[in-house]
Amino acid sequence: MTALIEARGLTQRFGDFTAVDDVSLHVDAGEVVGLLGANGAGKTTTIRMLLGLARPTAGEALLDGSPPTRQSRRRLGYVPQGLGLYAELTVSENLAFAAQAFGCAPAQLDGALADEADSLVASLPLGLRRQLAFLCALQHSPDVLVLDEPTSGVEPLARARLWDRIRSQADSGVGVLVTTHYMQEARQCDRLLLMSDGRLVAQGSEQDIVDGTRTVAVHADDWARLFEVLSTAGMAVNLAGRDVRVIDPDEERLRTALEQAGITATVTEVAPTIEERMTMLARG
Amino acid sequence: MSVQNLRVHRGHTLALDDVTLETPAGRVTAVVGGDGAGKTTLLEAMVGLVTVDSGTVDTPPRSRIGYMPSGAGSWNDLTVDENVSFVGGSYGLSTDEVARRAEELLGRANLLDARDRLAGRLSGGMRQKLGFCLAMLHQPELLVLDEPSTGVDPVSRVELWRLISEAAAAGTAVVLATTYLDEAERAGWVLVLERGKDLLSGSPDEVVASCPGVVVETDAPVHPDLSWRSGEHFREWWPDGPPDGDRPADLTLEDVSIVASLREGMKA
């Protein structure tokens, strides 16, 4: 089976700077693939090459086995981070405009969006704007859906409903590539890819992504003092409730720091988060 | 420090409807909710930027509050150093005091190398960290941060949380708004707002324990309106208890917040 989206040794250089370095990936029909990485990791540049919006310096981006063309791009639905809507057009005008560009009939509006059909997009709350951007990207029944941080700033129930839609698209055979910063969203994906400094550094399940990172939760009565002591000792610390989380702790240093400060603490192994893995990647 | 039984109108909309929140020194308090929930209005009421219809606001004077509005709170056309001097001057800090605080805060935020860069040219994460430093410059008793981590990448997010944690550990009362529940789980206290109402509040564990009804994990939800996806499976909320045989799921704040919204929707 040919992958819907495929990158082979995809590379993008800007002068001396390599934004994307030898990235190979694929998205098959019916799966949701999550692309993770810090800002500057190369996610957006990779997506632009996959969509045919930027030409790779080396390697190739394939859409259903061939380089993307104006014609084959019709099979894509894309929701950019900025949503790509026209603020000075109404809801139904935005939908009609996108439909015309793709040569399809405008989708039916339903629910809260139907009540706002004649409202300017500029006047809509963010949640509705996101729903509209989705509808605009889906109305021509694409085979591939590319979503750049689809639920940034959306409350949990609305986010769950958007993910219902993403998953049901995948269930009907659409291949989905989605970038996200957030663990809860990463958990909704079938497969994850982690980029750092332009390279693909890990892939697979959430477990595969955090593999190699260790986190301990340290608990003491005076959490404020504990936090200060460990932070001053130069450890990668974070606060979770009243526990201090330490990423990749040097056991010796941790014990010494606690002893010298005279702190009695319990240390428990906890599951590392994707953010913690990325933090350690950034620390090098 | 607290706000009690706050009611606030914005235009004709009731933006806050009887909201109460305590913000003691040394605690990070997270205000959670979506677009239009009333998070910003609540923070602005604490800072004294909106007029309240009724209720009490018991917070320090403006000169002892640090406030970072959503979207950073720095001036894009000024350099990092110029932002610091400008804000320091507006709080009446001496030049020496500003220099000392800047060195300390920018150092902790890893921004010392960026002092001569225009704020508008910084990455999103760096700009938010600068906003944090500016809000902390005058050593406020109460630090109010409006969505400090929205649009910030994970690495900067961990750094920002380290700064927030340090401020709380040093005794500052911190209140922050966020749309992300995994973040709220790190806070000492959580307030879930929806359409101006406080749906839930307590420590993250208390809020999770207070979930009404029962949530089960299932592959075949019975009521689509009361279920949502969680990884490969679904979760379904049974307000009056589940059918026999279904075991309750391990809940997160995210689940409980979804249940609170579903219940609010049923009432409406």
Image (spheres, coloured by chain):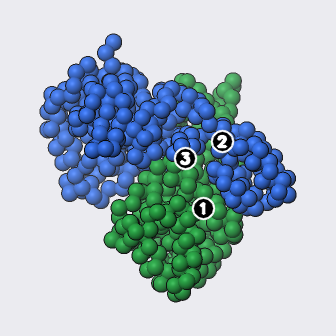
Q: Quadrant of the N terminus of chain A?
A: top left
Q: Amino acid at mark 3?
A: Arg
Name the image quarter holding residue B240: top right
Instruction: Kindly check if marks 2 and 1 are in contact, taking CB atoms under 8 A apart as contact.
Output: no
Q: Badge 3 is on which residue?
A: A283
Q: Nearer the viewer, residue B236 or B2?
A: B2
Check the rendered structure and report the hue given to chain B: green
Q: Is residue B178 visible?
A: yes
Could you tell me how far apart the alpha carbons at marks 2 and 1 are, in whole angstroms? 21 Å
Disc 1 residue crowd, few under 14, some 14–19, many 20+, Cα 10 Å: many
Residue displayed at 77% across by 44% down: A252
Q: Is residue B264 above or below residue B28?
A: above
Q: Nearer the viewer, residue B149 or B117?
A: B117
| Chain painted in blue in the figure | A
Q: Amino acid at mark 2?
A: Asp
| Whole-percent x, y for residue B44 in the image | 50, 72
Residue displayed at 26% across by 19% down: A65
Labels 2 and 1 positioned on one and the same chain: no
**Chain holding disc 3:** A
Lateral position of residue A133 relative to residue B88, left or right: left
Q: Which mark is residue A248?
A: 2
Q: Quadrant of the C terminus of chain A?
A: top right
Q: Badge 1 is on which residue?
A: B164
